[in-house]
Image (tube, rainbow, N blue to C red):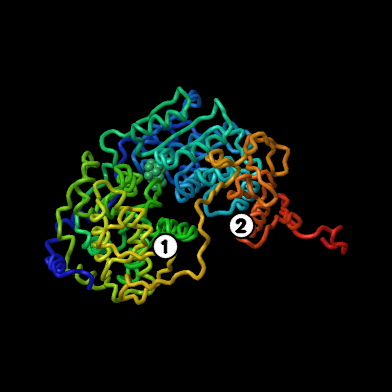
């Protein structure tokens, strides 16, 4: 049994849950928008109107669309850029798609007319789907470019479809600009650039990559830029303005609170030890009250905790769950997104991957486990319910000690304390605690628990006001509440990184390279140390420079680069301003301990060449004698339709006439 006696007593009190449960389980229904002009009242192309009416089945604009469309469709609007701030779920996607499609209908230069930059793969796919439905009766082609899909596959799709609208993530688009031959020429007629969820694209950790992407786009005084989000704090606004033309317009459509009025928002606090059982009780309550219509999104603070909780609840509590987070494979993410979208009821365990822009119909409850990292995150997550004019509920399940630092951040929002308090914990909590007990864990769960614990330590360490002991105690109690008999071990390296190495309650293992193997499911934290047979040689730094850009800092290291070399290095006659690292035939730079391979050198910019150079370099570096790349056996590819390629001896060299 994972819970101590005092907690069991607390659970078994089972204080009247019905009162709060009634509020928690209020049904949802259609609300009326304040003002919904019919789409016919706008001067739209007949195919667009038909797409709205027949494919999307939206005869009327939402309130936000009713305000944005007249601004963006006005003839003089093309001379301005727009920063649009409107609540989540109010129809911003169509608000930018409709004018973009209308502009393509009026002007059809070859190439891509509209580029939509999305913050996640899932959002890019969702926008693509909505654009395709809107354009069902147009001949307009839309292509998504997202991570997890091979670049060559993207190229084939672009060649075949010749899209007018491209929807992509920043990383994938940048990768194409850096590595796909003449990719930039597709954008010569670009008339509209959309940055959806602009505040996250402009966040400090993403800004550099976004700026790199934008630097590849041709400069054009007539290109319109649209920036949209449900949260645009003032400090982000000046960044938005810096991407716009001076005449830009700001449409601030959030009056009053930034969350939808139709969302009932509650919060409750729990000790870490009781978080898992409380969560289970809330879910049970929701399923019991709405057996065929419950649709619940549960947000966890880390992807690893979401993965662990999903596996635990599925395997130990027999709950049917959908799962979508950063630990899922790309195909699993796409499948989960589609399944939960189509499901009439269900529960989704997720993390950051789902909090922005994603549109699942009829979500009845958004449940946030532990404090969000910011006010914006809270608002976006709550925005996953009550979309398109429906009603919904949001529940924030905090740890006791999170209330004081977090609640002031959302003091202006209509969030009330859940009236049930400890009644969230009912008699069933006892059974939950018992069922979760690691004594009965299925195979594999201990490793998930260890990963979740490490991620919790990281997450909590980044929270304000959390000193090391508190971080360790909180994460440990949480894991005990999830059924462990003792907290998992942690590598000393991680403890050092987080400044937790002196915490007495942390069970450390010395070597970071050790493979952890649970001895038995009954004692998941008792892991056996299995040192690797061979360790990689010590190294101080690995420079990784994808694409053609030479990383900074090389000058300080004394590495010679060639700034004058302007040829593209890909066999074309193109010139580009860029630097190359100068290397000898063994891939050695002028600094003995630094090597370089691939596109950052002035050799042939082809993947097979880089691979071969890498193998030869590894032999030189790791003592198998000096080895030079063998350019005789480089596979070559011809970008043609059908595609063709070759490798090995030429007909002449072979002498047999074979190719
Ligand atoms: N005119 C309309 N009539 C009815 N429903 C609509 C209309 N326009 C959009 N919707 C629906 O409203 C929901 C929310 O729309 P959308 O995803 O565009 O919101 P959003 O403002 O972009 O939200 P977020 O800020 O979360 O990205 C979607 O399910 C969409 O299909």
Quarter location, residue 590: top right
* SS of the residue under disc 1: loop
Q: Where on the image, by quarter, is ligand 1?
A: top left
Kindly tell me whether residue 289 is visible in this rendering: no
Q: Residue 398, position in %: x, y?
A: 23, 53
Label 2 sits on residue: 621
Q: Are marks 1 and 2 in contact (CB under 8 Å)?
A: no
Circle 1: is it few (<14), some (14-19), or many (20+) Cα within 10 Å? few
Mark 1 or 2: the one toward you: 2
Q: Is residue 629 above or below residue 117?
A: below
> Image point 50% across, 43% down: which residue?
170
Residue 147 got which mark?
Answer: none
**Quarter occupied by the C terminus:** bottom right
Kindly tell me whether residue 408 is visible in this rendering: yes
Q: Is residue 438 above or below residue 191?
A: below
Quarter location, residue 27: bottom left
Q: Residue furthest front?
A: 592
**Quarter occupied by the N terminus:** bottom left
* SS of the residue under disc 2: helix
> Image point 65% across, 48% down: which residue?
160
Q: Residue 185, position in %: x, y?
A: 64, 37
Give the total number of marks visible in the rendering.
Answer: 2
Question: How far, Cα to Cα, is label 1 from label 2?
Answer: 24 Å
Q: Is residue 76 above or below residue 535?
A: above
Label 1 sits on residue: 512
- Which label's residue is closer to the chain start, 1 or 2? 1
Circle 2: is it few (<14), some (14-19), or many (20+) Cα within 10 Å? some
Residue closest to the eye, 422 or 589: 589
Residue closest to the eye, 29 or 233: 233
Q: Is residue 317 left or right of residue 145?
A: left
């Amino acid at each position: 049994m994972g819970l101590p006696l005092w907690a069991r007593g607390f659970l078994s009190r089972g204080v009247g849950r019905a009162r709060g449960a009634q509020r928690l389980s209020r049904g949802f229904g259609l609300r009326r928008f304040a003002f919904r002009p019919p789409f016919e009242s706008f001067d739209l192309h007949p195919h667009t109107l038909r797409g709205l009416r027949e494919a999307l089945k939206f005869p009327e604009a939402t309130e936000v669309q009713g305000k944005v469309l007249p601004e963006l469709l006005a003839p003089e609007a093309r001379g301005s850029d727009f920063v649009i701030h409107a609540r989540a779920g109010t129809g911003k996607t169509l608000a930018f798609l409709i004018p973009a499609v209308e502009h393509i209908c009026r002007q059809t230069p070859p190439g891509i007319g509209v580029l939509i930059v999305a913050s996640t793969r899932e959002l890019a796919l969702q926008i693509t789907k909505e654009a395709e439905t809107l354009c069902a009766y147009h001949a307009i082609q839309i292509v998504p470019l997202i991570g997890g899909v091979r670049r060559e596959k993207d190229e084939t799709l672009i060649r075949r479809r010749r899209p007018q609208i491209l929807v992509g993530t920043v990383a994938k688009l940048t990768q194409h600009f850096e590595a796909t031959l003449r990719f930039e020429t597709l954008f010569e007629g670009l008339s509209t650039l959309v940055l959806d969820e602009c505040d996250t694209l402009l966040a400090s950790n993403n800004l550099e990559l976004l700026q790199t992407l934008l630097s590849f786009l041709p400069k054009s005084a007539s290109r319109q830029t649209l920036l949209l989000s449900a949260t645009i704090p003032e400090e982000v606004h000046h960044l938005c303005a810096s991407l716009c033309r001076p005449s830009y317009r700001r449409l601030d459509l959030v009056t009053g609170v930034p969350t939808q009025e139709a969302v009932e928002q509650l919060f409750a606090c729990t000790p870490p030890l009781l978080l898992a059982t409380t969560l289970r009780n809330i879910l049970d309550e929701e399923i019991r009250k709405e057996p065929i219509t419950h649709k619940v999104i549960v947000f966890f603070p880390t992807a690893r905790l979401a993965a662990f909780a999903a596996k635990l609840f599925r395997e130990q509590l027999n709950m049917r769950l959908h799962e979508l987070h950063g630990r899922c494979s790309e195909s699993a993410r796409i499948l989960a997104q589609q399944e939960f979208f189509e499901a009439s009821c269900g529960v989704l365990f997720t993390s950051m991957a789902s909090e922005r822009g994603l549109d699942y119909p009829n979500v009845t409850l958004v449940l946030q486990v532990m404090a969000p990292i910011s006010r914006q995150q809270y608002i976006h997550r709550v925005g996953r319910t009550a979309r398109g004019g429906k009603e919904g509920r949001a529940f924030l399940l905090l740890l006791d000690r999170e209330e004081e630092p977090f609640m002031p951040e959302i003091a202006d929002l209509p969030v009330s304390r859940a009236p049930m308090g400890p009644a969230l914990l009912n008699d069933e909590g006892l059974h939950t605690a018992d069922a979760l007990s690691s004594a009965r864990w299925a195979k594999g769960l201990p490793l998930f628990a260890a990963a979740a614990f490490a991620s919790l330590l990281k997450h909590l360490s980044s929270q304000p006001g959390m000193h090391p002991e508190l971080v360790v105690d909180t994460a440990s109690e949480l894991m005990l509440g999830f059924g462990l008999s003792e907290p998992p071990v942690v590598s000393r390296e991680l403890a050092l990184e987080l400044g937790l190495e002196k915490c007495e309650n942390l069970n450390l293992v010395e070597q970071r390279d050790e493979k952890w193997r649970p001895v038995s499911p009954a004692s998941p934290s008792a892991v056996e140390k299995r040192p690797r047979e061979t360790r990689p040689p010590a190294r101080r730094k690995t420079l990784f420079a994808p694409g053609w850009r030479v990383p900074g800092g090389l000058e300080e290291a004394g590495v010679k680069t060639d700034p004058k070399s302007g040829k593209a290095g890909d066999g074309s006659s193109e010139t580009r301003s860029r630097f190359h690292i100068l290397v000898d035939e063994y891939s050695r730079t002028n600094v003995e301990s630094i090597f370089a391979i691939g596109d950052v050198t002035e050799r042939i910019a082809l993947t097979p060449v880089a691979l071969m150079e890498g193998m030869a370099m590894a032999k030189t570096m790791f003592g198998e004698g000096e080895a030079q790349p063998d350019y005789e056996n480089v596979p070559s590819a011809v970008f043609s339709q059908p595609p063709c390629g070759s490798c090995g001896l030429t007909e002449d060299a072979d002498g047999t006439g074979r190719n």
